[in-house]
Amino acid sequence: MNIHQLKPRTQRTYAKRVGRGGKRGTTSGKGTKGQKSRAGAGVKIGFRGGDSRLWKQFPKQRGASKKPGNNSPHQKHRFFQLKHDKPVAVNLGAFDKFSEGQEVTAQMLVDKGVIRNTKDTVKVLGGGILKKKVILKGFNFSESAKEKITKAGGTIA
């Protein structure tokens, strides 16, 4: 058996050719007049009746390259903004509630009422003064917070 001898199991289906005479009448199911009734004509995807296309109304993201064909793919619009989750900010002064040498996690901050839940990431900022040696585990830190923690004798795990 060769490739030219293979036959499909199902019969080929052809698209219905409308408006070529036959039993469907003059308009052939396409209605009367207008762009969509003409042969070979149709409305392009994204056409909004002569109004600007939706993606053309978005201003381009700043910093896009000026080279031809190298536009930034990121676009923004005042109604369609991507929401990025920011980490919850906690100042160093909040860690004075814990005892000396205690290992502090995000769940312990929830128990003390410093943050609402453990779903969000927590970033420790350098505001306030840390007076106790504590072990901080599972947080993001600013540079000033890292300096103050090590100066107070605490550790970052």
Image (cartoon, helix red, strand yellow):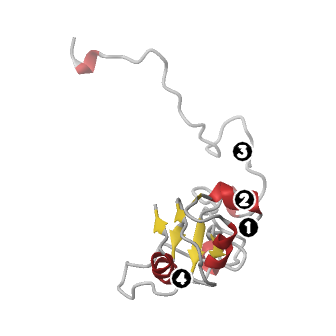
Residue designated by label 1: 114
Q: Is residue 93 left or right of residue 26?
A: left
The 10 Å Cα crowd at callout 1, few under 14, some 14 to 19, many 20 or more, is: some
From this view, report whether residue 96 is shown above or below residue 135. below
The 10 Å Cα crowd at callout 3, few under 14, some 14 to 19, many 20 or more, is: some
* Cβ–Cβ under 8 Å for marks 2 and 1: yes
Residue designated by label 3: 28
Q: Secondary structure at mark 4?
A: loop
From this view, report whether residue 24 is shown above or below residue 30. above
Q: Position of residue 92 (x, y in %)?
A: 61, 77
Using the numbered discs, state the Cα–Cα distance from disc 2 to disc 1 in whole angstroms: 6 Å
Name which quarter of the figure residue 101 lies in. Answer: bottom right
* Cβ–Cβ under 8 Å for marks 2 and 3: no
Q: Secondary structure at mark 2?
A: helix
- The residue mark sitting in front, 3 or 1, is 1
Using the numbered discs, state the Cα–Cα distance from disc 3 to disc 4 in whole angstroms: 47 Å
- The residue mark sitting in front, 3 or 4, is 4
Decide which of 92, 46 is in the foreground and name it.
92
Amino acid type shown at disc 2: Val
Residue designated by label 2: 110
Image quadrant holding the N terminus, namely: top left
- Label number found at residue 156: none
Q: Is residue 63 left or right of residue 97?
A: left
* Cβ–Cβ under 8 Å for marks 3 and 1: no
Residue at 63%, 67% in the rendered image: 85
Amino acid type shown at disc 1: Val
Q: Earlier in the sequence, mark 4 or mark 2?
A: 4
Amino acid type shown at disc 4: Gln
Whether residue 10 can be seen here: yes
The 10 Å Cα crowd at callout 2, few under 14, some 14 to 19, many 20 or more, is: few
Residue designated by label 4: 61
Residue at 46%, 87% in the rendered image: 63
